[in-house]
Image (cartoon, grey):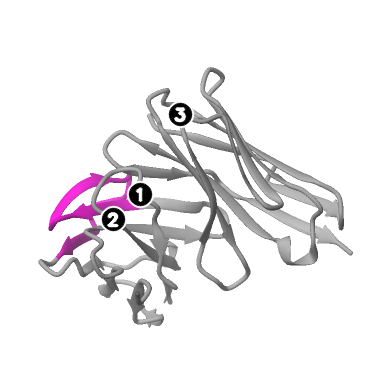
């Protein structure tokens, strides 16, 4: 099976802009989670989608949003970008039920200038 | 709230020696505890996981132990090798499928 893919891999934006990142899960996986990784903060949970519904949400401002499509592909959007949003954004997919192994994509490295 | 604490944040070990990383979690209902290894510039990859119905699991040079009463679990790497150098993250599954990660341990193997 093909692994989790993310596009784009690298992105440079300026403050105030918005950005949309995409994640394609492993075929058959219905859960997609998003994480923000920064050197000082480790892996911070953003949100998780399962069957097109947001099932869990982390402690991020409303500028961070996401959605999931019927084919389980997911997008996350960040509006009104701030310098502090510069990070590696990782998505991970897992299978049908709880407690399944999460498989990570390669990430999208976002730089906000 | 959901919380996972991980220690130490950095660890240097002589090649061939053992390394131990410890994590504690806040929710006694957690029942799934994976460990991920992230090499520089790469994605986190699962190396071992344990569920709450077992106390220990081994896979070659790595092992994980779980103490549900004390709400802590540990990663043990024996006979360390240079390729073990990486950042290791523990995690615990809380409530409705929310995986919370520890802050990571940067492990350096000294040749």
Instruction: Look at the image and say whether residue A54 sits in the magenta stretch.
Output: yes
Residue pointed to by mark 3: B53
- Please provide percent x and percent y for residue B24: 56, 31
A86 or B39, which lies in front?
B39
In the displayed orientation, state which residue is furthest to the top. Answer: B69
- Label 1: state its secondary structure: loop
Do residues under tags 1 and 2 come within 8 Å of each other at their CB atoms? yes
Residue pointed to by mark 2: A95
Q: Earlier in the sequence, mark 1 or mark 2?
A: 2
- Chain holding disc 3: B
Tell me the quarter of the image containing the C terminus of chain A: bottom left
Q: Residues within 10 Å of mark 3 (few under 14, many from 20)?
A: few
**Region rendered in magenta:** A46-68
**Residue drawn at point x = 45 percent, y = 30 percent:** B52
- Please provide percent x and percent y for residue A16: 29, 71
- Label 3: state its secondary structure: loop
Is residue A27 shown above or below A92?
below
Residue A79 shows in this picture: no
Do residues under tags 2 and 3 come within 8 Å of each other at their CB atoms? no
Is residue A69 shown above or below A48?
below
Residue pointed to by mark 1: A100
Residue A71 shows in this picture: yes
Marks 1 and 3 sit apart, C-alpha to C-alpha, by 15 Å
Marks 2 and 3 sit apart, C-alpha to C-alpha, by 20 Å
- Label 2: state its secondary structure: loop
| Residue A20 shown left or right of residue A106 in the figure | left
Q: Main secondary structure of the magenta part?
A: strand
Is residue B67 shown above or below B63?
above
């Amino acid at each position: 099976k093909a692994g989790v893919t993310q596009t784009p891999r690298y992105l440079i934006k300026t403050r105030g802009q918005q950005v949309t990142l995409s994640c394609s899960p492993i075929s058959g996986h219905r859960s997609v989670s998003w994480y923000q990784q920064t050197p000082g903060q480790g892996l911070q949970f953003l949100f998780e989608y399962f069957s097109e519904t947001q099932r869990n949400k982390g402690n991020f401002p409303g500028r961070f949003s996401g959605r999931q499509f019927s084919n389980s592909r997911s997008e996350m959007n960040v509006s009104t970008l701030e310098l502090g949003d510069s990070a590696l954004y990782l998505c991970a997919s897992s299978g049908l039920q709880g407690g399944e192994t999460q498989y990570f994509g390669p990430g999208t490295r976002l730089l906000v200038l | 709230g959901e919380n996972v604490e991980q220690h130490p944040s950095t660890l240097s070990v002589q090649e061939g020696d053992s390394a131990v990383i410890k994590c504690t979690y806040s929710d006694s209902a957690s029942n799934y505890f994976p460990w991920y290894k992230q090499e520089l510039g790469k994605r986190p990859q699962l190396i071992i996981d344990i569920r709450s119905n077992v106390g220990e699991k081994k896979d070659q040079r790595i092992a994980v132990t779980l103490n549900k009463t004390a709400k802590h679990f540990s990663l043990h790497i024996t006979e360390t090798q240079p390729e073990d150098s990486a950042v290791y993250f523990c995690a615990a599954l809380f409530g409705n499928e929310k995986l919370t990660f520890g802050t990571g341990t940067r492990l350096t193997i000294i040749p």
